[in-house]
Amino acid sequence: MRVLTMSWAAVAAAIAAGAMGLLASGATASGQDPPGVSDANDPSVIHDCLITPIKLIPVPAEEMGRLVEIKVRENQYVKKGEVLAQIDDRKAQAALNVAQHKLAAAEKEAGNKISVDYAKAKNLVARAAYDKGTEANDRVPGTTPAIELLKLKLEVVASKLETDHAEYQLEIAATNVGVRRAELEAAKLDVERLKIVAPWDGQIVKQEREEGEWVKPGDAVFQLVQMDQLRIEAFVDGSRLSPADVDKRPVSVKVTPAPGQEATVQGQITYVSPLVEAGNRFLVKVDVANRRQGEHWLLRPGMKAEMTIHLRR
C-alpha cells in the first residue's frame, strides 16, 4: 500500500473544506460563531474571514485503462491543457493509424475520374457512330439497316447512362471522404481521452493513483486546486449593514502569511447571499487575485484574513 504524504496545500484544502462546511451550517459544533465577525466599533471591518478555493476538484480519468506514465508530482503548478498522466493508448493509436489510411484511400478514390472520363469518351464514340449511320442513310437510303441504327442509338444511350453512373459513384466517393474524416476525428478523440489533462491552471495537491494502476472513467487521479484566484467568505452584521450597502463594493483584505509579516490585497464583493443566517447575518464572497512570494503563494486556502469593506460615504 502506498503511503501518502500530505503537502501544505492538501492541509489547506482540508481546512478549507471543513471551514466551508462550517459556513454552510452557520455555527461550530461547540456553538461558537462561524468565521467572519464584524468589528464591534466598525461593521465594515470583518475579522477572521475565511480564505477558500474557488476551484478544488478531482481530475478524473475519462477512459478505462492502465496508467503508464505520471508526468507531474504533488505540489507542482500546472497550466490548463497540460498532460498530467497517460493511460495506455496503444490500441487507440493503432485505430488512429487505420483511420488515417482509410481517409487517404478515400481521398484517392474521390479524386479518381478515370471511370467518368472513359464513359464520356465511349459516349462520344457511340454518338459519332450513330451520326455516321444516319448521314449515310440520308445520302443513300437503306445504307445502314434500321436495326443497326437502333443498336447504334442504344450504344449512345447506354454510354450516357455509364457516364451518369460514374459521376454518381464519384459523388459517393466524395461523401465517403467525409465519413472517413469523421472517423479520423473520432479516433483522435479516443487518443486524447486517454490523456489526463489539467482543466485549468492550478496546483497538484494530491496524487490519487500510481503508475501501473488500472483506472476506470470517473476515477480521481489527482486533486487540483486553483491558486491564482481565491475566495474570501465572511458574514456581515445585518443589523448594521444591508445587502445594498455592501453589494459590489471594493474591499481590502489583510493577511498575515507568516509571523511578523503582513500583506494586503484588493478585491470586490461579487456575491451577497439572500439568506439571513443566525444572529441576523448574511454571507458575502469576494474573489481576489493571488500572487507569489518567492516559491510560495501569498494567500492559501484555510487562512484567516481581515476584510475592510469600502462603503459609500
Image (cartoon, helix red, strand yellow):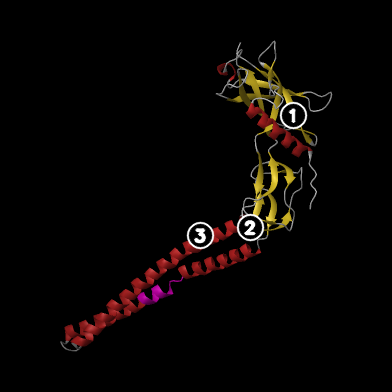
Question: Is 58 above or below relative to 284?
Answer: below
Comparing 232 with 122, the one in front is 232
- Badge 1 is on which residue? 303
Q: Name the side, left or right, on which 248 lies relative to 45.
A: left
Q: Earlier in the sequence, mark 1 or mark 3?
A: 3
The three-letter amino acid code for the residue at tag 1 is: Met
- Badge 3 is on which residue? 182
Question: How far apart are the alpha carbons under marks 3 and 2?
Answer: 23 Å
Residue 2, image x, y percentages: 79, 51
The three-letter amino acid code for the residue at tag 3 is: Ala
**For the point 67% across and 29% down, which residue is it?**
22
Question: Is 53 above or below relative to 236?
Answer: below
Quadrant hosting residue 91: bottom right
Question: How far apart are the alpha carbons under marks 2 and 1?
Answer: 38 Å
The three-letter amino acid code for the residue at tag 2 is: Met
How many marks on residues? 3
**For the point 72% across and 51% down, which residue is it?**
209
Q: Which residues are magenta?
A: 111-120
Residue 289 visible to an observer of this rendering: no
Q: Are marks 2 and 1 in contact (CB under 8 Å)?
A: no
- Quick one: SS at disc 1? loop
Instruction: Indicate whether residue 46 is drawn in magenta.
Output: no
Q: Main secondary structure of the magenta part?
A: helix
Residue 63, image x, y percentages: 62, 56
Residue 284, image x, y percentages: 62, 24
- Badge 2 is on which residue? 64
Q: Earlier in the sequence, mark 2 or mark 1?
A: 2
Q: Earlier in the sequence, mark 3 or mark 2?
A: 2
